[in-house]
Image: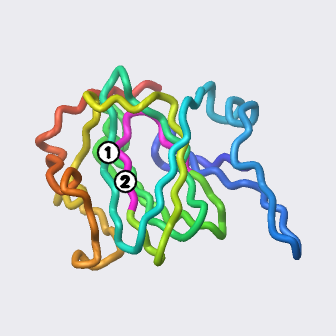
Amino acid sequence: MNFISTPFPGLFLIEPKVFGDQRGYFFESFQQTKFDEALGKTEFVQDNESKSGLGVLRGLHFQKPPFSQAKLVRVITGQILDVVVDLRKGSPTFKQSYCIELNDTSKQQLFIPRGFAHGFVVLSEEAIFSYKVDNLYAPDYDAGIRFDDPDLQIDWQLPAELLQLSEKDRKLPLLSETDIPFTFQQ
């Protein structure tokens, strides 16, 4: 398992070692000791999975403290564009977005520390998306930012007419209207 730094402090791309032959493939998607050695102690408490069709956009979501969440995300089937926005005041990448395509071929994963908004859009006909979180869902602390915030200028790689969002996600506030509760910790 390789842990690759990104330009965003604390945000890591994880490349598993995949072993394949005529029968299929095998890889470790998570190993606590390796994870702790590379990124520090994180205790995941819940696994989540979603299935979505082409153009489904989920996000940009985050939970406010004390229920903020770190996430380890991956694609089981299909291809997505995964997007995070750094909401940590004082971070060198504060209010910047990072985008990466994740798919079932490379099996890459993204570790997203607390203090980021997160979302994704499905680029294939269908995708199964899986992620671990280090804090339980707390509806009263649920928050988000509009996917089409002009200050973020995120290219979701699909025409607007193909995007499918929940009513909740369509009504999320702009970043400039959001009370940002995170501070960067080095």
**Where is residue 92 drawn, in percent x and y?**
37, 39
The total number of labels drawn is 2
Determine which quarter of the picture holds residue 120: bottom left
Structural crowding at the residue carrying mark 2, measured as other residues with C-alpha within 10 Å and reported as few (<14), some (14–19) or many (≥20): many
Q: CA distance from mark 2 to mark 1?
A: 6 Å
**Where is residue 21 drawn, in percent x and y?**
88, 72
Where does label 2 land, which residue?
119
- Residue drawn at x 71%, y 31% is 37
- Residue drawn at x 35%, y 66% is 56
Query: Measured along the vertical axis of the image, is residue 47 above or below residue 52?
Result: above
The residue furthest right is: 22
Determine which quarter of the picture holds residue 180: top left
Query: Measured along the vertical axis of the image, is residue 91 above or below residue 160?
Result: above
The residue furthest left is: 177
Q: Is residue 99 magenta?
A: no
Where does label 1 land, which residue?
61
